[in-house]
């Protein structure tokens, strides 16, 4: 960083501050992670200088000898890792990947059946504030009292609404989806199936949960959450949709791909193909299970009955008397970062909801295991229960920093 320090001290200082924040903070935001130094090197490389519209072997500009190498590697590795028939690695992030996938198979006004936002779905799955909701007609399904998707209700909705596309996927839902049940319903009504695996891609790649890719027509994902790659998006699909997806990415929606991201993605997917990655993915599940058990023990009300993946959603308002916003703030004071989150049919407002979402991918990457998760769960509970006691919170923060220093970022 010597050149940056000399040339632009303001940016350099902010970067150093962020590094220290990441080193000393306990990152429990379910969508965050730490990439490897090799991924960072590829990301900060000269590939950022290159325009490469088109696909490997079929570009609109010259000079593609090496961009073709990295993009082909990323595609081949993605296909191998997920057992996909086709992969496009150019989407700039998860939200554009979804927009692109919709545009590839839908016409304006078409109906999409997607998961309700407060039941764990994502904004891009048809929330009224999004562009996609202005173009397509979204109808949203929910979970039942047991915390599973209400498949009977889903089938009834599918029959009455006749969706062109049935969308699975979530950002704050914690249970395993029955891929077969879901796609069987879609088949009954002739709907195309899509699964947005943004949150769980790393768990699938590491074989810690079943792979939905063989079941669904189209699978979109981010590359920077559990998957542990650079920020970006990816679309996998059946051969039947390959051409429509590729065209929808470019020229349909995007311009030149960010080749430095794609190079870094190739590196990250290479890491995911190694045996150590399976250990990481399995440890995520173990850590989340311990978090679930410990928080239940402390009296937290967990939504959907617990977790089958990397995160939990807790109703802190009804079980601990603190709102989601208050919980986020008090944990911030002790160096633990989480996010406030709506619970299903939350009576409170999005900016101060009843719940919080807590995820373990980032601390698992740092090497923390069951023992550390037990400590962290205890601190979370104590911090909330003693939220007025500044001195107590100050002491807890020291313990959090001490533990973080024992588990450095990937080197
Ligand atoms: C995070 C997420 C996205 C959006 O990804 P961005 O990279 O932030 O655009 C889309 N879908 C789901 C399910 C997500 O969790």
Image (cartoon, rainbow, N blue to C red):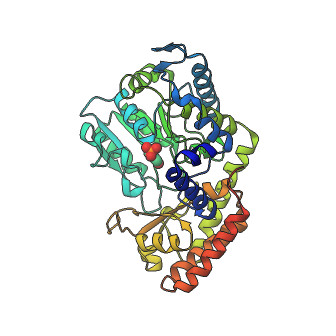
Identify whether 9 is placed above or below 296.
above
Identify whether 62 is placed above or below 157.
above
Give the percent coordinates (x, y) of residue 189.
Answer: 36, 34
| 282 lies left or right of 298 | right
Give the percent coordinates (x, y) of residue 76.
Answer: 62, 25
| 156 lies left or right of 82 | left
Report ligand 1 position as a quadrant.
Answer: top left
Give the percent coordinates (x, y) of residue 182.
Answer: 46, 42
Which residue is found at the position 28% from the left and 42% from the top? 133
Which residue is found at the position 46% from the left and 52% from the top? 171
**The one of 125 and 304 positioned closer to us in this rendering:** 125
| 340 lies left or right of 381 | left
Which residue is found at the position 75% from the left and 41% from the top? 275
**Label total for image:** 0
**Furthest-front residue in view?**
6
Q: Is residue 169 visible?
A: no
Which residue is found at the position 57% from the left and 84% from the top? 392
Q: Is residue 358 visible?
A: yes
**The one of 67 and 343 positioned closer to us in this rendering:** 67
Identify whether 46 is placed above or below 229.
above
**Furthest-right residue in view?**
275
Instruction: Name the quadrant containing residue 17.
Output: bottom right
Give the percent coordinates (x, y) of residue 263.
Answer: 60, 31
Identify whether 293 is placed above or below 104.
below
């Amino acid at each position: 960083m010597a050149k940056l320090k000399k040339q632009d001290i303001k940016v350099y200082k902010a970067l150093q501050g962020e590094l220290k924040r990441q080193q000393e903070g306990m990152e429990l935001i379910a969508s965050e992670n730490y990439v490897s130094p090799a991924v960072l090197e590829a990301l900060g490389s000269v590939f950022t200088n290159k325009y490469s519209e088109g696909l490997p072997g079929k570009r609109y500009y010259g000079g593609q000898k090496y961009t073709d190498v990295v993009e082909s590697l990323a595609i081949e590795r993605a296909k191998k890792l997920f057992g996909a028939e086709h992969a496009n690695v150019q989407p700039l992030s998860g939200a554009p990947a979804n927009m692109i996938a919709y545009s590839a198979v839908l016409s304006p006004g078409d109906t999409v059946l997607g998961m309700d936002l407060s039941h764990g779905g994502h904004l891009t799955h048809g929330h009224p504030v999004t562009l996609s909701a202005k173009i397509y007609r979204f109808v949203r399904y929910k979970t039942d009292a047991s915390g599973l998707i209400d498949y009977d209700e889903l089938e009834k909705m599918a029959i009455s609404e006749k969706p062109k596309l049935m969308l699975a996927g979530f950002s704050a839902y914690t249970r395993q989806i029955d891929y077969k049940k879901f796609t069987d319903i879609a088949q009954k009504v002739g709907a195309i199936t899509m699964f947005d695996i943004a949150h769980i891609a790393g768990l699938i790649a590491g074989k810690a949960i079943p792979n939905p890719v063989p079941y669904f027509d189209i699978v979109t994902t981010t590359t920077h959450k559990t998957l542990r790659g650079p920020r970006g998006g990816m679309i996998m699909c059946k051969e039947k949709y390959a051409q429509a997806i590729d065209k929808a990415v470019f020229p349909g929606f995007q311009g030149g791909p960010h080749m430095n991201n794609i190079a870094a993605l190739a590196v990250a997917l290479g890491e995911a193909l190694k045996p150590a990655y399976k250990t990481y993915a399995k440890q995520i599940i173990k850590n989340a299970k311990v978090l679930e058990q410990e928080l239940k023990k402390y009296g937290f009300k967990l939504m959907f009955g617990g977790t089958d993946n990397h995160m939990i959603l807790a109703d802190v308002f009804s079980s601990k008397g603190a709102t989601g916003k208050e919980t986020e703030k008090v944990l911030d004071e002790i160096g633990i970062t989480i996010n406030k989150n709506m619970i299903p049919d939350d009576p409170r407002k999005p900016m101060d909801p009843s719940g919080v979402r807590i995820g373990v991918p980032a601390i698992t990457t740092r090497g923390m295991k069951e023992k550390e998760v037990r400590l962290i769960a205890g601190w979370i509970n104590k911090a909330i229960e003693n939220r007025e006691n500044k001195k107590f919170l100050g002491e807890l923060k020291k313990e959090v920093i001490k533990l973080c220093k024992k588990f450095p970022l990937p080197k």
